[in-house]
Image (cartoon, grey):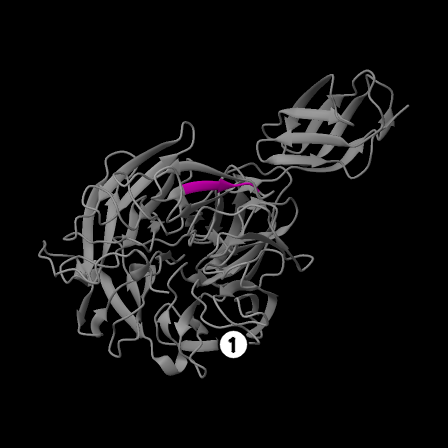
């Protein structure tokens, strides 16, 4: 599906003049060719694997010309089509890229057509065997899943279709559920699992002014519009939101703003406030539908589909986005008819790799006109680390940390708390979340003394492991053992609030059994959620 056509805007823009650009930071690494995959994905972004390679999808190409899943190294010198879609069996036309799931470390994605019912598929890719398995075939009434799902704090996958249907897929049990409520009209962006535990998305239409929305979806499927775009502050948002450590959301709109060519915005929830950071005017780019990525320097980086000097899009930066936004046009794509000089019309969002370089795709252009894989080198790139999947962490469970040079790791910390870990290779290690961990960034220290830190904050889910003593009368002082207890706001015994409680450490709470309490589960409520004891406390 051509997003630009969907907006109903002009078919092309005239070439624009502009200032000189930092073209030396751009490098065309690989040029797609339809026999092994072409027209790389319209939505989503590249996925970094534990092997250090990047994974994505092409909408077309492959033996059946129905799209592929590909793997490419960060130099662009080794490219492999790991799966070719075949229509009925595995689906066709994968538009959305891939995500990685915590429970099984497999990749998940969607196709917009094919499958046993013809409406598209939700599929699983085992990266170790390059085998695809369809876990759900969508019906025509459900709608086509244009974008991949998102893993939420409950470790289930949540997604939307082009008809607004919303769904949940339980990876652990392999079950699919159609949720009761629909997203606002034309919700074509992947959902964001936010720091408040909810999912957030955008829609091109709907809202008070019918020009798009930002909406919230709870894990129960309840949907609430938190902002309606009015044209002046943007129109037709269609790229995934991102969130900074302080909770601020950032995103783009495909149209609207002061010159109708789209905007970059920030959004905060309390109170709900949207600020336009930049309105595109054509000369500086137009239609920023690929969304944003935040660099290690705190700058926002993105692409436009049209506009710029040559009218076929550019790469831009907005520095100091939370204080004094400054816009810079970093690189202009160029074409020569349908065969691009560098690649053109980047639909897909950028990806910040743990090597400090930003990578992206263009849907067209390159030597054969079939799209390119490119890199953007930022000033003073530095290594960093990330998690493969989910920033909501379960105590004592292993998490996969991705990075560079990890064979030299000598320490891993979660929010400053040391963790046990095992190095798998230079590009990944596995660490167990310590029971005294608190919310904060993850840090890996190398033997050289270099410290690698995650951009995101980990959020520790509460867990009650045991009660000491396990029984007693009202007034008994009970030690609640577990973890994730920082910021505990409530402790109840069979639903009755504790007479008194104190958080001794993130792994220990002491609470007094209230008068009149009955035997039952003990529940702890924290800013990150709530958890009931596996066994009941017996009141005697």
Tell me the residue at 31%/41% (across/down).
Answer: 265
> From the viewer's perspective, is residue 36 above or below residue 326?
below
Q: Which residues are magenta?
A: 214-218
| Rendered view: 126 above or below 6 | below
**Residue to which mark 1 is pinned:** 87
Please indicate whether residue 30 sits to the left or right of residue 471 in the image: left
Q: Is residue 217 magenta?
A: yes
Label 1 environment density (alpha carbons within 10 Å; few <14, some 14–19, many ≥20): many
510 or 179: nearer the viewer: 179
In percent of the image, x 23 and y 42: which residue is there? 257
Q: Quadrant of the N terminus?
A: bottom left
Confirm whether the magenta stretch covers residue 97.
no
Residue 320 showing in the rendered view: no
How many dots with numbers? 1
Q: Main secondary structure of the magenta part?
A: strand
Q: Position of residue 423 (x, y in %)?
A: 56, 59
Q: Residue furthest front?
A: 141
Residue farthest along the right direction in this orientation:
540
User: Can residue 439 be seen in the rendering of this structure?
Assistant: yes
């Amino acid at each position: 599906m051509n997003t630009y056509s969907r907006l109903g805007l002009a078919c092309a823009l005239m070439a624009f003049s502009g200032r000189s650009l930092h073209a030396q930071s751009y490098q065309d690494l690989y040029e797609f060719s339809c026999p092994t995959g072409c027209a790389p994905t319209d939505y989503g972004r590249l996925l970094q694997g534990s092997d250090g390679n990047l994974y994505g999808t092409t909408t077309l190409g492959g033996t059946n010309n129905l799209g592929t899943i590909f793997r490419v190294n960060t130099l662009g010198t080794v490219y492999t089509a790991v799966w070719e879609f075949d229509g009925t069996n595995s689906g066709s036309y994968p538009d959305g890229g891939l995500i990685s799931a915590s429970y099984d470390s497999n990749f998940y994605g969607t196709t917009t057509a094919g499958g046993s019912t013809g409406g598209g598929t939700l599929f699983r890719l085992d990266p170790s065997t390059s085998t695809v398995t369809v876990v759900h075939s969508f019906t025509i009434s459900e709608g086509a899943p244009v974008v991949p799902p998102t893993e939420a704090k409950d470790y289930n996958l949540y997604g939307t279709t082009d008809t607004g249907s919303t769904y949940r897929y339980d990876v652990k049990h392999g079950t699919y559920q159609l949720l009761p409520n629909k997203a606002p009209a034309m919700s074509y962006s992947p959902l964001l699992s936010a720091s408040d535990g909810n999912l957030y998305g955008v829609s091109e239409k709907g809202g008070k002014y019918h020009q798009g929305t930002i909406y919230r979806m709870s894990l129960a499927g309840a949907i609430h519009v938190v902002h309606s775009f009015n044209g002046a502050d943007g129109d037709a948002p269609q790229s995934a939101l991102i969130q900074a450590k302080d909770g601020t959301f950032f995103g783009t709109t495909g149209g609207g703003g002061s010159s109708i060519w789209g905007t970059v915005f920030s959004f905060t929830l309390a109170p709900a406030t949207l600020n336009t950071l930049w309105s595109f005017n054509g000369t500086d780019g137009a239609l920023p539908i690929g969304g944003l990525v935040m660099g290690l320097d705190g700058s926002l980086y993105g692409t436009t589909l049209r506009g710029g000097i040559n009218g076929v899009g550019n790469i831009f930066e907005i520095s100091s986005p939370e204080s004094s936004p400054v816009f810079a046009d970093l690189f202009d794509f160029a074409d020569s008819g349908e065969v691009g000089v560098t690649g053109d019309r980047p639909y897909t969002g950028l990806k910040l790799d743990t090597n400090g370089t930003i990578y992206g795709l263009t849907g067209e252009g390159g030597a054969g006109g079939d799209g390119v894989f490119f890199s953007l080198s930022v000033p003073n790139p530095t290594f960093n680390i990330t998690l493969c999947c989910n920033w909501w962490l379960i105590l004592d469970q292993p998490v996969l940390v991705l990075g560079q040079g990890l064979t030299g790791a000598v320490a891993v910390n979660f929010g400053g708390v040391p963790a046990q870990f095992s190095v798998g290779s230079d590009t990944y290690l596995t660490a167990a979340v310590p029971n005294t961990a608190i919310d904060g960034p993850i840090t890996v220290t190398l033997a050289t003394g270099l410290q690698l830190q995650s951009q995101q904050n980990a959020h520790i889910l509460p867990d009650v492991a045991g009660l000491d003593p396990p029984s007693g009368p009202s007034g008994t002082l009970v030690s609640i053992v577990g973890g994730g207890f920082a910021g505990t706001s409530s402790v109840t015994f069979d639903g009755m609030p504790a007479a008194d409680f104190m958080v001794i450490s993130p792994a220990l709470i002491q609470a007094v059994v209230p008068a009149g309490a009955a035997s039952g589960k003990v529940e702890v409520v924290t800013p990150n959620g709530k958890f009931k004891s596996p066994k009941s406390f017996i009141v005697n």
